[in-house]
Amino acid sequence: MKKIVAFASAAVLGLGVAACDSAAENEAEENIEEMEDARDAEVNQMEDEGMITDDQADAMDDETDAMEESMEEQADEIDEM
């Protein structure tokens, strides 16, 4: 879990220092997708191993979706800078 938070933080930081062009926005969005995929895989594994309940997995998935949406909004703003 700590790895996911660190990865998400790095992705957000990357958005803050990215260049102001479409290539930077695309790269940021790719990083966001990779983070989401990694987190989803980790949540699924934790659920499969019985480390978390279905409700906990759903809550974590909702949290991932919220983080992804927020980071994508930030990525969309890269071109506006």
Image: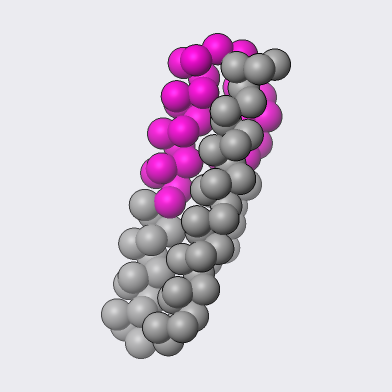
Q: Residue at x 57, y 55 (%)?
A: 66
Give percent across and percent down for residue 21.
55, 12
As displayed, is residue 26 above or below residue 30? Answer: above
As displayed, is residue 24 above or below residue 60? Answer: above
Q: Residue at x 41, y 42 (%)?
A: 33
As displayed, is residue 55 above or below residue 33? Answer: below
Give percent across and percent down for residue 79.
60, 17
Count how many numbered circles sit on residues in the image.
0
Q: Residue at x 50, y 30 (%)?
A: 28
Give percent across and percent down for residue 64.
51, 58
Q: Taking the image as drawn, is residue 67 in sight?
A: yes
Colouring mode (rainbow / by chain / secondary structure / one colour): one colour
Q: Is residue 63 magenta?
A: no
Mainly helix, strand or loop, the magenta region?
A: helix
Quadrant in which residue 27 is drawn = top left
Q: Residue furthest left?
A: 48
Which of 20 and 3 lies nearest the eye of the viewer?
20
Q: Residue at x 40, y 83 (%)?
A: 54
Which of 62 and 52 lies nearest the eye of the viewer?
62
Q: Is residue 31 magenta?
A: yes
Q: Taking the image as drawn, is residue 19 in sight?
A: no
User: Over which residues does the magenta segment extend?
Assistant: 11-36
Give percent across and percent down for residue 25.
51, 23
Q: Residue furthest top?
A: 21
Q: Quadrant of the C terminus?
A: top right
